[in-house]
């Protein structure tokens, strides 16, 4: 699967009969050859139209940032207020861009490389999520598909992911991301 395929898969599954909110649709997807020159984050942002504060529902509960929302998603992380004046945080790497949030937790793309490794920021703890934005999107889509296969009924009465579903998710996410990144992904999204 290529980055274009992963973006197309996300756009194709988003909505899930009202379980995802907002608007996410596919624009013309640039050829993968453009990834080398522009970086995966730019291809992702150029390929998707994100409006009305899109949220992937279900167990992921991810609020997604489109190009127009990126500045707000950086607040309190890359940009902090000092005496009411916005300033770049010296604690936040300049190559990190928050592309999604899950409550107070952030999904961060590292633009230091064209593949854009993905990290999870939970307070001051940083979790590895994926070696590339493409891999991260594949894992997200895999979880969304598993939820659909179970008619979105994946949690028990206490809102924990059922053991049988968790085993499926763990297998799919590990296949997409490798064991170390899968642990970070599962901790951030399901932990």
Image: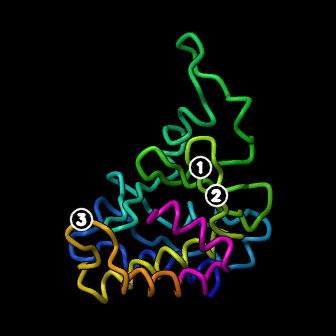
The crowd level at tag 1 (other Cα within 10 Å; few <14, some 14-19, many 20+) is many
Q: Nearer the viewer, mark 3 or mark 2?
A: 3
Q: Which mark is residue 144?
A: none
Question: Looking at the rendering, which quadrant does residue 93 occupy?
Answer: top right
Which is more toward the observer, 113 or 31?
Answer: 113
Circle 1 sits in a helix, a strand or a loop, which is it? strand
- Contact (Cβ within 8 Å) of mark 1 with mark 3: no
- Contact (Cβ within 8 Å) of mark 2 with mark 1: yes
The crowd level at tag 3 (other Cα within 10 Å; few <14, some 14-19, many 20+) is few
In the image, is residue 173 above or below residue 81? below
Q: Which residue is mark 1?
A: 121
- Is 185 inside the magenta-drawn segment? yes
Report whether 97 appears left or right of 153.
right
Give residue 11's position: percent from left, percent from top. Answer: 42, 75
Report whether 112 appears left or right of 50.
right
Q: Which residue is mark 3?
A: 158
- Is 46 inside the magenta-drawn segment? no
Give residue 58's position: percent from left, percent from top. Answer: 31, 68
The crowd level at tag 2 (other Cα within 10 Å; few <14, some 14-19, many 20+) is many
Give residue 20's position: percent from left, percent from top. Answer: 29, 66
Which is more toward the observer, 171 or 131?
Answer: 171
Circle 2 sits in a helix, a strand or a loop, which is it? strand
Give residue 39's position: percent from left, percent from top. Answer: 73, 63
In the image, is residue 138 above or below residue 38? below
Q: Residue at x 59, y 79 (%)?
A: 4
Q: Which mark is residue 127?
A: 2
Question: Looking at the rendering, which quadrant does residue 128 occupy?
Answer: bottom right
Cα–Cα gap, marks 3 and 2:
26 Å
Q: Residue at x 73, y 72 (%)?
A: 34
């Amino acid at each position: 699967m290529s980055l274009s395929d992963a973006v197309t898969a996300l756009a194709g599954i988003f909505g899930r009969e009202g379980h995802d909110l907002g608007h996410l649709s596919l624009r013309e997807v640039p050829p993968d050859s453009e990834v080398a020159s522009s970086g995966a984050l730019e291809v992702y942002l150029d390929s998707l139209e994100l409006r009305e504060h899109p949220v992937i529902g279900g167990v992921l509960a991810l609020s997604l940032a489109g190009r127009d929302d990126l500045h707000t998603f950086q607040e309190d992380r890359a940009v902090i207020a000092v005496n009411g004046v916005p300033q770049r945080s010296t604690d936040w790497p300049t190559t990190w861009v928050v592309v999604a949030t899950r409550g107070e937790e952030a999904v961060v793309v590292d633009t230091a490389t064209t593949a854009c490794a993905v990290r999870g920021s939970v307070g001051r703890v940083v979790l590895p999520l994926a070696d590339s934005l493409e891999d991260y999107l594949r894992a997200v889509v895999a979880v969304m598909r598993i939820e659909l296969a179970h008619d979105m009924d994946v949690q028990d009465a206490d809102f924990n992911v059922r053991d049988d579903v968790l085993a499926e998710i763990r297998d799919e996410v590990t296949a997409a991301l490798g064991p170390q990144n899968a642990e970070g992904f599962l901790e951030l999204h399901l932990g």
